Amino acid sequence: MVQTYSENAVLPGRGVPIPFDGLTTQLAEMLELPATDVQNAFWTMAVGALCAVCCSLSGCFLVLRRISLLGDALSHSVLAGTAGVYLVTGRVDPVPMLLGAMAAGMVTAVMTQFVHKAAQLPEDSSIGIVFTSLFAFGVVVVSQAKHVHLDLDCVLFGDLAFAGVNLHPVFGWLVPESFRSLVPTLMITLLLLAVFWKELRLTSFDPTLAVTLGFSATVMHYLLTTVVAIVTVSAMEVVGLLVVALLIVPAAIARLLTDRLSTMLVLSCLIGISCTTIGYLLALRWNSSAAGLTAVVAGAELLIAIVVSPRNGLLGRLIRTARLRVRICAEDVLAGLFRRQERSDAPDGLVQASVSECYALAGGGIMSMAALRWLLSRQLLQQAGSVMSLSETGLRYARSMVRSHRLWEAYLKENFNLPPDHLHDPAEDMEHFIGPGVQQQITEDLSQSAEDPHGRAIPDVKTQEVS
């Protein structure tokens, strides 16, 4: 449930200035809302944005290394760390429990690698074994401990909705208490990226090469795990166990949108900020869990990215497939007209065909109409009324297509000794993907390249590429 705070909520810091207080007051006047409500929303979104940046930066490397489940493991092992500290000290103190949670994260990473290597289990299986065991240990200790109450709402959802309420003086300013852990966490994460940028990139994309060059992939793994553990512990106070969504989903979305690591880091941060901001605003609107809606928004953005991603998305693949089909249909028309010209009485002239005949050569259907428009727009065909013919450029393109087809038939016959009736179909498919370079290589490999296995001449001309 989302609530706002009153003046009594900041009594401990009365007299201490609040950053951007004048700006939030002016904004409240413009929106005709209580100043405390606007200030609460401002600081809540600031905490959410800071939390999202911390998670997104480290989460990118988890996604690239294909160990995303490690974030889930670390978020669950936190309970074992805090419970272990309570067993030793018998008290509930924030600082020791924070250290215990970080130690539990390191233990999770070490034990995961040990089980993975010692038992020869897949890494995802070893992560699942370790984190469930540690989480169960924490649950048992907490359930047996006296005078300890586990707030499930806080553990599961965090307190993002109340981040703007709990303000405390820091360096003479009144800021959310979460800043005291999130700001150092962000600085540690940025320091890791600045100092070990080259090593992180190399071990993330090619750990074998990293070891060959003298870099320790194991050391970088544990260093990254330490930072992820610190990020997880700091972020859990804000979004609870749903920290996994901020660790993985923005990084996964960014990975769909780009192949450059630097761009991926920036995009993941922006996406994470949008998730926390939109999630909190929806929580205000629907009086629901801010952390829960943050995860829902992240999932919705992932679905959108899966559809619209220009390179890896469904829409992008659909467009590329359609373009390929149009090109293949168009090239079938060119090759068909060239073969007609070879069989004509005047092989040096440009053979003509009706629009319906060209449409049939393209295979018929919607793609055939698009193929004819593709040919006309690139001036590979020229049209006079209802009659079409190859242009000079189209003739060169068509000659290259037929050359690719017959070279591939000759290559299959010479190297695989296929019967003549088994050569046409594979050559029909391959002719669309054999360029001048491959044509030259096949020509050099053949013992004779003047005729194909059917006795037809193989055209020998330099082709003109058309995009």
Image (cartoon, grey):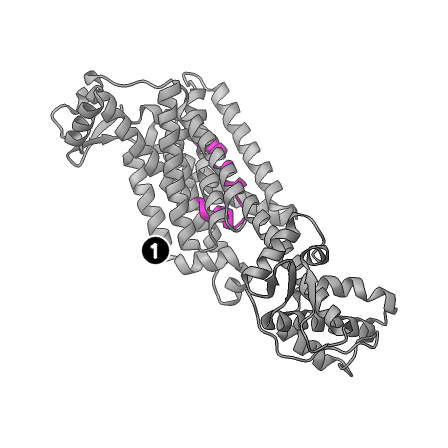
Q: Nearer the viewer, residue 136 or 10?
A: 10
Where is the C terminus found, in terms of image quarters? Answer: bottom right
Q: What residue did someone put label 1 on?
A: 194
Quadrant of the rendered structure where residue 91 is?
A: top left
Label 1: which secondary element: helix
Task: Please give left or right for residue 27 compared with residue 294 in the image.
Answer: left
**Image height of 271 relative to 149, above or below:** below
> Where in the figure is residue 183, as x and y percent of width and height?
29, 40
Q: Nearer the viewer, residue 78 or 146?
A: 78
Q: Nearer the viewer, residue 60 or 116?
A: 60
One can see residue 6 in this view:
yes
Q: Which residues are magenta?
A: 59-81
Instruction: State the residue lying farthest toward the front.
Output: 385
Magenta span dominant secondary structure: helix
Identify the residue at image location x=19%, y=22%: 35
**Disc 1: CA contacts within 10 A as few (<14), some (14-19) or many (>=20):** few
> Where in the figure is residue 434, as x and y percent of width and height?
66, 68
| Residue 312 in magenta stretch | no
Identify the residue at image location x=22%, y=23%: 31
Where is the N terminus found, in terms of image quarters? Answer: top left
**Image height of 6 relative to 259, above or below:** above
> Where in the figure is residue 308, as x and y percent of width and height?
50, 43
Task: Please give left or right for residue 223 compared with residue 382 in the image.
Answer: left
Task: Please give left or right for residue 49 compared with residue 388 in the image.
Answer: left
Task: Check disc 1 and give the amino acid type.
Answer: Ala
Instruction: State the residue lying farthest toward the left.
Output: 15
Identify the residue at image location x=40%, y=54%: 262
| Residue 68 in magenta stretch | yes
